[in-house]
Amino acid sequence: MLSKLHFASYPCQELIGILNLTRRKKIALVLTVIILIIGGVLYMLADRYLIEHVEVDVAAKTPAVAQADSNAATEQVEQDDWNYSSADTQIHIEKVESGSGSDKVTYFVADVQFADASLLQSAFAKNAFGRNITEDTSAIAAKNNAIFAINGDYYGFRDDGVIIRGGTLYRDEPARDALALLSNGTIKSYNEEQLTSSELLAEGVTDTYSFGPILVKDGVIAGDFDKVVIDTNFGNRSIQGSNPRTGIGMIAPNHYVFVVVDGRKDNYSKGMTLSEFASVFTELGASVAYNLDGGGSSTMYFMGRVVNNPLGKQQERGVSDIIYIAE
């Protein structure tokens, strides 16, 4: 009875104040929990897709310097905006346009021949291997004194695949059909789950690229591309439909074709489907061809300039790696 009287003695306003304070504390607690959860999710996404994670520092390559007379070496080189010819490297780039209006397609074909397979090299953004480490294709190319370059497979966007570069194994997580470059000047497509990294290195593989799909095999289009899935990463755009594309094909040992297709820009280029892209390589005479990272990454660099129109805005998107040629 006394406790009831004691409770009843509280003024109504004080009781309401206590109740409101309790409710505010609960709301504040709930909001704090929500903020912490959202913050945690945002951090995990940033850590996975934005924050740089350097796994291996790679020493910058020092370009070989010929010991011959520099004037004599210069006289052997002939070059213009679309061609380069020296004693050991020939590059010819052609801009191709087809269709009109909304169906117009613009792409660039580089026919490249070199005397030694070691002239075809790879480089990482910021000379480091890891996740979310990016630079523009042109920036990586310039740092490596490249004559010619294209974007690679953007290995840093995913954490699987078998990644060998310059004869060094950096990642060994088999996941998909891949491409291997060999020291004898040839390339081959293979399934990462069917060939071990040690077998690849023993065979003379210098570089591997893990993206896909395989476009051409034994001189014919490799198959049906309607259900191709490269990965399921958050934010990854489907590679079906007409898109900007980058690919590499081999006509003969030490004789390659590189194709970069622009897209997503009205009345300039809509891009290509995978089937259309594969057809370009068969028409060029490639016995093997492989699809590399495309979309906004698709970039072709030649003699200090970007040849194509990345993103349809003359604006490059950072990538994790390139394939390039340097004397």
Image (cartoon, rainbow, N blue to C red):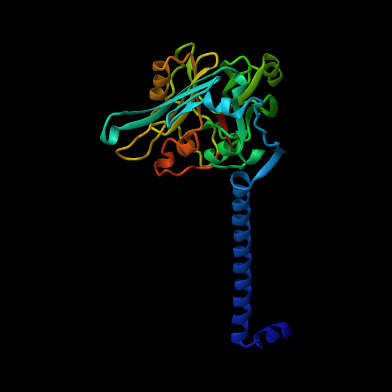
Taking 248 as reference, is 309 left or right? Answer: left
Q: Quadrant of residue 202?
A: top right
Residue 112, placed above or below residue 16: above
Q: Is residue 214 visible?
A: no
Query: Can you say which quadrant of the picture contains the N terminus?
Result: bottom right
Residue 290, placed above or below residue 308: above
Query: Can you say which quadrant of the picture contains the C terminus?
Result: top right
Q: Quadrant of residue 5?
A: bottom right
Asked whether 286 or 170 is in front, the reply is 286
x and y percentages locating residue 318 in the rendered image: 54, 42
Q: Quadrant of residue 166?
A: top right
Q: Is residue 203 visible?
A: yes
Asked whether 34 or 148 is in front, the reply is 148
Task: Name the residue located 62 percent from the left edge and 22 percent from the top edge.
Answer: 118
Taking 248 as reference, is 267 left or right? Answer: left
Task: Name the residue located 67 percent from the left edge and 26 percent from the top edge.
Answer: 67
Asked whether 261 or 123 is in front, the reply is 123
x and y percentages locating residue 163 in the rendered image: 64, 28
Task: Name the residue located 63 percent from the left edge and 60 percent from the top edge.
Answer: 33
Asked whether 239 or 189 is in front, the reply is 189
Residue 259, placed above or below residue 138: above
In the image as oriented, which residue stretches furthest toward the top?
A: 218
x and y percentages locating residue 219 in the rendered image: 46, 12
x and y percentages locating residue 77 in the rendered image: 51, 25
Count the labels in the image: 0
Residue 114, placed above or below residue 273: above
